[in-house]
Amino acid sequence: MYIPPNNIIIIKYMQKLLFLFLLPLIPFSFPCHAQTTYRMVTRNYSPVTDSYPQEVSNFKKADSVYYFTVKVSKAYDDTLKRKVAEKVLYSPNDIYDGEVASYLNPTRLIDYSSPTIELITDSLFKGEDSIMTIIKKGLEFVSHYISFDDSLATAISRGDCKTLDVNHILQRKKGTCSEYTNLFTALMRKKGIPCRFVAGFIFIPEQKFYGCHAWAECYLKQYGWMAVDPQSGKSWLPTTIIRLFAGTDYTGCGLNSFMDLVPKSIEIVKE
């Protein structure tokens, strides 16, 4: 597969940058495309890359390198599915099977057993019977509860730290996108809503902005996995963000470091 030389230069330059999870999102504006198609070459690959609202084609593996094209659609524009999500009612007695059920369990990084988490969920979601309302309230709370932590960002960029656990986040009230995601995920699981940690890559060449990002996905019956961004507080993601891995938490994604998310090459395919 042909890899444009200018893209190789871009990737080498990217590796010298702080990733997106180390930077506040506010200064950047995200193009609102209905869909964007990327041609990628990566060192790692997960099947979640090829799941709604993404679609993988032209997949090939050679010499431990993955070549593929991925089309990312803006799920928020899928009005039929969005209406389904808005009608899903919350019940504390909902039962989930198989893999979905595993995203209700606590982990070392996402432990929701503390009295503080219980207090937050009891007061924040009291009387709510709409899952979307619970999700939106959780997003709003987390996006304001945590402030961006430059010192932690520096530590992560040096490889001194991966991500903080929920108890430390509650104490410090600071973090990067991973910490926003950990706290939000803890609130959802405490409430009985399956939620997973997602990691991916942002590519906005027109703004010369590239980097890794972490966010959450909540599971809604009759809908499936819905992507939300705890750092920005939004219940949708733009097509400039590509899902690459998902797991019960950061370590559950199988990542050794966020460098695992950086593609060897990436370009936008013009439709």
Image: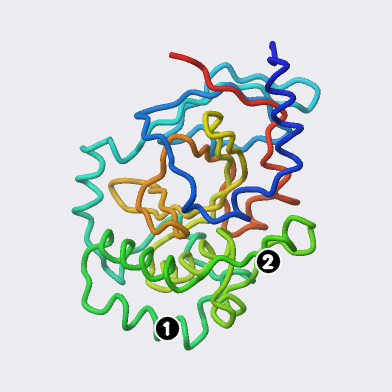
Give coordinates of residue 124: x percent, y percent: 32, 77
- Locate residue 158: give its quadrant: bottom right
Vertical order, 51 against 175 (above or below): above
Left or right: 245 as drawn, with respect to 227: right
Quarter of the image that includes the C terminus: top left
Give coordinates of residue 101: x percent, y percent: 46, 59
Which residue position holds label 2?
152
- Locate residue 210: give its quadrant: top right
Q: What residue type is labelled 2?
A: Leu
Q: What residue type is labelled 1?
A: Glu
Number of other residues with Cα within 10 Å of mark 2, as a class: few under 14, some 14 to 19, many 20 or more: some
Which residue position holds label 1?
118
Q: State which tag comes first along the sequence, 2 or 1.
A: 1
Quarter of the image that includes the N terminus: top right
Alpha carbon of mark 2 to alpha carbon of mark 1: how far?
A: 26 Å
Vertical order, 82 against 56 (above or below): below
Q: Which residue is drawn at 29% across and 75% down?
A: 125
Q: Dots 2 and 1: beta carbons under 8 Å?
A: no
User: Between residues 243 and 222, which one lies in front from this camera angle?
Assistant: 243
Q: What element carries label 2?
A: helix
Q: Residue at x 70, y 37 (%)?
A: 14
User: Between residues 15 and 258, which one lies in front from this camera angle?
Assistant: 15
